[in-house]
Image (cartoon, helix red, strand yellow):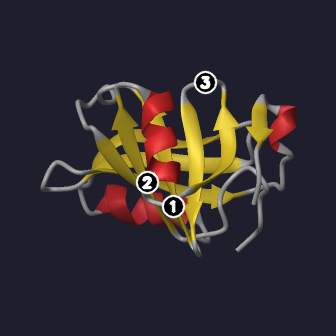
Amino acid sequence: MLSNRSIPDVTIIPELHYADLGAAVEWLCDVLGFRERLRIAGHRVQLTFGDGAIVAVQGDGDAAGADHRLMVRVEDVDEHFARVRDAGGSVVRAPETYPFGERQYAVVDPGGHAWVFTQSVADVDPAEWGGELVGE
């Protein structure tokens, strides 16, 4: 799998929504022991814990009403998308390539859980798209 400085080097990344992102990040770090990795435009913060990672997101939920999502890194997002689409999956967003070096699509599973599948397509310095690398 291609490495990309704009995303943690893990396979599964939970995205959790918080009404007060700053307070949540402070608590997650001070109390639970997470470490800030990357700040994204005041609305997202990547946090690491050992060899795992989460993304804390500002807000009570996304457009689908979810207060969490799971992001999964895959080798070939288009192939994965085709399999899900062909099986009748509930696609929220078709594959799209973003300036931060990831190609992603979104789907909702039969239980109503939101998933984002992502493929690193370039190694992009977070500073190029407005991210602030805090530490590794």
Which residue position holds label 1? 33
Give how far across and how far down residue 30 sits, in percent.
50, 50
Which-is-in-front pick, marks 3 and 2? 2
* Marks 3 and 1, the one that precedes in the sequence: 1
Q: Which mark is residue 31?
A: 2
Instruction: Pick whichever, 107 or 123, lies toward us.
Output: 123
Labels 1 and 2 touching (C-beta < 8 A):
yes
Q: As shown in the figure, which amino acid type bears the numbered disc 2?
A: Val
Q: Secondary structure at mark 3?
A: loop
Q: CA distance from mark 3 to mark 1?
A: 21 Å
Labels 3 and 2 touching (C-beta < 8 A):
no
Q: As shown in the figure, which amino acid type bears the numbered disc 1?
A: Gly
**Furthest-left residue in this view:** 111
Which-is-in-front pick, marks 3 and 1? 1
Which residue position holds label 3? 42
In the image, taking residue 103 as reference, residue 82 lies left or right, namely left
Give how far across and how far down residue 102 sits, in percent.
67, 49
Q: Secondary structure at mark 1?
A: loop
Q: CA distance from mark 3 to mark 2?
A: 21 Å
Residue pictured at 35% horizontal, 48% vertical: 69
The quarter of the picture where the N terminus appears is bottom right
Structural crowding at the residue carrying mark 3, measured as other residues with C-alpha within 10 Å and reported as few (<14), some (14–19) or many (≥20): few
